[in-house]
Image: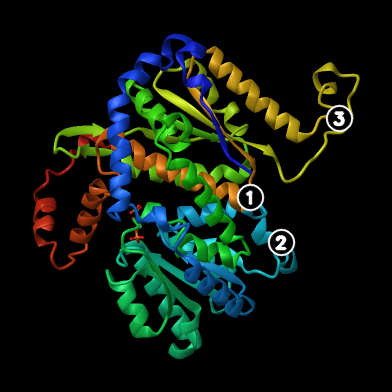
Amino acid sequence: MKMRMDYNNMLSDRIGKDGITKEQFEKAAGKIEKANKAMVEKRKAGKMAWRDLPYNQEAVVKDILDYVKKMKDDIDAFVVLGIGGSALGPMAVQQALNHPFYNELPRDKRGGFPKLYVLDNVDPERLVYFFQTVDPTRCLFNVISKSGSTSETMSQFMIIQKLLEEKMGKEASKKQIVCTTDAVNGNLITIAKAEGYKYFIIPSAVGGRFSELTPVGLLPAAFCGLDIKGLLVGAAQMDEACKVDDINKNPAHMYALLQYLSLQMGKNISVVMPYADSLKFISDWYAQLWAESLGKAVDLDGKTVNVGQTPVKALGVTDQHSQVQLYAEGPFDKNIVFLGVDEYRETITIPKTYGDMPSLGFLGGVTHNQLIKTEQDATEYAITKAGRQNMTITLPKVTAHTLGQLLYFFEVATAYAGELLNIDAFDQPGVEEGKNATYAMFGRPGYEEKKAELDAAPAKDKKYVI
Ligand code: PA5
């Protein structure tokens, strides 16, 4: 089963003056050649280690599956403590592949696997309420942090570690914690080794938002009974398609080029609109990948560029009743990526209850599968008629295999877009300022200068607080 991308409606031939022209493609030839070269060279130089993940994790997968087998019957819930790239992927994969009400199902209907929770935020209410609903001594807490030092994750870890030790004693509580982190960098690996926690390694050359196919995503997925080998096989299949130099045959490179050209035309917003609840959190995962990778102040030549494209998450058909009015008639500042599926996992038919009422009768005997698909087609038609750029990515069915293709596709597209924009897609300097300010506000040693800078900042004027 193969994912496909239809970009007809990005083109001027189809949508008129706001579409991408043949001349724009021709003009980009030099950039494409340069980007192709950079992708190959960077991969060879080990700067895109995430591209090897579909191939080099046999031992890791075995370790994960053995560990799941050993632990799963002793726990009620698997709880991820992580944020950003260490949380969004696990949520997206779980939502995509498992029952939408997985945690509500009785255990035998979950295949005997534990529930899954992802506690990414540090809103105090969340953690307190969470402990009102679960028995922590029956949970396995997966502390995920590539850097091993993220305040949100490490603070949750410290709270939970203390709680478990109080309830179970230090020794017994050790098996309730498993860490996923870098082999050398950060505090988490040091702690895991010192405390004797089980741990899994995130390869050091793989950055947070590109880490879903490492134990970051594979371990939570395996604990929920998902086919992690299938995810990797799907990714490997997409990798083959993404190695091709000819951009007309390379879906991820073409996606990036279309977005790049669209951006040049002032489309500063990239809407991703899945027509499947199962793919809803893929938009969240994509939003981080696209925003954090491509939103950059400075290019690779040191020039100030302030580039990027704002990802917007939407859901079909829900957002037809919310955002689509804006997409069809508002400013020409966005393109829309519809994410569809050919075959939903279930079918439900609308009864022929009100056959004599024309406004309801037409629905009788129609399936929700037909309704959602038709509404997707109709929205695509309306958006296209309004001359708005849009494209459609379709999965034949949402499976581990097609999901692996989709995740990998977006990762390659992001990296390629970075090359076209001539920026470093793998760093995130803009996130640092806020992190450093937090450290300074807490008086963390080493941040005295930042503290002085904060103290010297002008106070807010009360007259503007009403
Ligand atoms: O993509 C990134 O690097 C970030 O979004 C990280 O995933 C996020 O900040 C969490 O970092 P860490 O995994 O180091 O705790």
Q: Is mark 2 within 8 Å of ligand 1?
A: no
Q: Secondary structure at mark 2?
A: loop
Residue at image point 32% right, 30% down: 32
Residue at image point 68% right, 30% down: 373
Does residue 360 sit above or below 95 in this rendering?
Answer: above
Residue that protrudes farthest toward the top in the picture: 17
Q: Quadrant of residue 190?
A: bottom left
What amino acid is found at the position of numbered circle 2 in the picture?
Answer: Leu
Camera-near label (3 vs 2) is 3
Marks 1,3: beta carbons within 8 A: no
Answer yes or no: is residue 445 visible: yes
The answer for how far apart the CA atoms under marks 2 and 1 are is: 20 Å
Q: Is mark 3 within 8 Å of ligand 1?
A: no
Does residue 263 sit above or below 174 in this rendering?
Answer: above
Circle nearer the N terminus (2, 1): 2
Q: In this view of the protein, which residue sits in the foreground, 252 or 182?
A: 252
Residue at image point 29% right, 48% down: 42
> Dot 1, crowdedness within 10 Å: few (<14), some or many (≥20)?
many
> Dot 3, crowdedness within 10 Å: few (<14), some or many (≥20)?
some
Numbered label attached to residue 399: 1
Give percent across and percent down for residue 418.
31, 39
Picture colour scheme: rainbow
Numbered label attached to residue 365: 3
